[in-house]
């Protein structure tokens, strides 16, 4: 699946909810479904700086695609990082770098986040792009 088709899938999933409370509940469910990150990656070096909650993000390059795993100690944040890695995981560094990320605005997430969660989301996206740039540089 392309990054845009995954984004469109997420937009469609969220479109069934009319109230933001329902969307938050769905985010919580997504957080509960997030595959467990290996405990060896729950160290400070994998923490995303700028998040109020603890968010660990690990990336590895497998056959030219980046595979992300993540976890958080906050359930809504866990759902948010789950959505983000669902969009970016299993794509090439170049695809990740070139992505126009539009699903966040389309589902209304950005406008319903507290300023600290909004900053955390930006930090997550920045870290994912940094991983993509680092892996791309290693491939050359």
Image: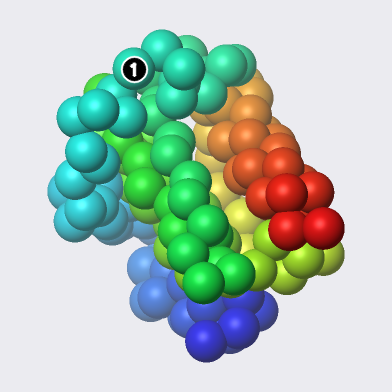
Q: Nearer the viewer, residue 135 or 91?
A: 135
For mark 1, what is the residue? Answer: 43
Say if 22 sits above or below 8 in the image: above
What residue is shown at x 77% (from left), y 65% (from top)? 94
The residue tagged with tag 1: helix, strand or loop? loop
Q: Relative to residue 34, is residue 116 depicted above or below?
A: above
User: Whole-percent x and y of residue 108?
Assistant: 59, 54
User: x, y (%) of residue 65?
Assistant: 56, 68
Q: Is residue 106 above or below residue 112?
A: below
Query: Residue 78 in the image: x percent, y percent?
Result: 33, 39
> In the image, is 38 to the left or to the right of 119?
left
Task: Judge left or right: residue 79 versus residue 125.
Answer: left
Instruction: Using a 10 Å C-alpha cutoff, classify the residue at mark 1 as few (fewer than 14 neighbours), some (14 to 19) or many (20 or more).
Output: few
Name the residue at 73% across, 49% down.
138
Residue 2's quadrant in the figure?
A: bottom right
Q: Residue at x 44, y 36 (%)?
A: 57
Q: Nearer the viewer, residue 74 or 105?
A: 74
34 or 19: nearer the eye?
A: 34
Query: Which residue is found at the position 29% from the left and 24% from the top?
Result: 42
* Quarter of the C terminus within the rendering: bottom right
The reply to whether residue 105 is visible in this rendering is: no
The image's colouring method is: rainbow
Q: Would residue 126 be seen by someone viewing this image from the given angle? A: yes
Q: For the image shown, how many numbered marks are present on the structure?
A: 1
Residue 100 sits above or below residue 20 on the image: below
């Amino acid at each position: 699946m392309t990054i845009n088709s995954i984004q469109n899938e997420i937009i469609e999933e969220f479109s069934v909810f009319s109230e933001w409370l329902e969307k938050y509940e769905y985010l919580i469910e997504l957080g509960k479904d997030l595959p467990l990150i290996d405990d060896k990656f729950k160290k400070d070096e994998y923490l995303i700086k700028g998040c109020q909650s603890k968010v660990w993000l690990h990336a590895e390059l497998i056959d030219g695609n980046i595979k992300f795993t993540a976890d958080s100690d906050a359930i809504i944040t866990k759902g948010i990082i789950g959505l983000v890695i669902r969009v970016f995981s299993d794509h090439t560094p170049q695809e990740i770098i070139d992505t126009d990320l539009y699903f966040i605005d389309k589902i209304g997430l950005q406008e319903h986040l507290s300023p600290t969660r909004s900053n955390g989301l930006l930090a997550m996206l920045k870290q994912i792009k940094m991983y993509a740039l680092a892996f791309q540089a290693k491939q050359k």
